[in-house]
Amino acid sequence: MNAQFSTWLRSTISQKGISDAEFARRAGVSRGAISSLINGRREPGRDLLNGISRALNMPMDEVYRVAGYSDSSGNDPTAARIAHMASLLPESDKRDVIDFIEYKLFILDRGSNQRR
């Protein structure tokens, strides 16, 4: 679970002076769903992130960024999914993901240079 998002959400709700029940109503979800998010037992999907953005009256890009999605507009959903999944990994495993992507890019680049 994304502890950073849970902490950010709790803090932001508190700063805005909104009760959990009111926040859930504004976001269009149950109070239990909000509790699960705040306690780190649930990961937010795109629909829930959109509701959170609306309930907090904040730009979607900011909410998506804190949740670990790189692009709320859906321009590159695969990249957003990779970023989100990587955000769930322990720091030691994140390096493995970066190494793998760098290797794939190296292979792609090498292949395109051989064709020139």
Image: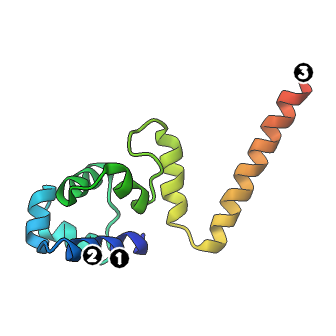
Q: Give how far apart the Cα atoms at labels 3 and 2 are.
A: 54 Å
Q: In this view, does 69 lie above or below 96?
A: above
Q: In this view, does 52 lie above or below 1?
A: above
Name the residue beneath numbered marker 2: 10
Name the residue beneath numbered marker 1: 7
Please tell me which of labels 3 and 2 falls first in the chain.
2
Residue 47 in view (yes/no) = yes
**Quadrant position of the C terminus in the picture:** top right
Residue at the (69%, 65%) spot, across then down? 95
Inspect the image, locate mark 1, and give the three-letter code of the amino acid beneath it: Thr
Point out the frontmost of discs 3 and 2: 2
73 left or right, relative to 93:
left
What colouring method underlies this structural image?
A: rainbow
Residue 30 in view (yes/no) = no
Residue at the (21%, 55%) spot, across then down? 57
In percent of width and height, residue 94 lies at 63, 65
Q: Give how far apart the Cα atoms at labels 1 and 2 are.
A: 5 Å
The 10 Å Cα crowd at callout 3, few under 14, some 14 to 19, many 20 or more, is few
Residue at the (69%, 57%) spot, across then down? 98
Q: Give how far apart the Cα atoms at labels 3 and 1 are.
A: 51 Å
Name the residue beneath numbered marker 3: 116
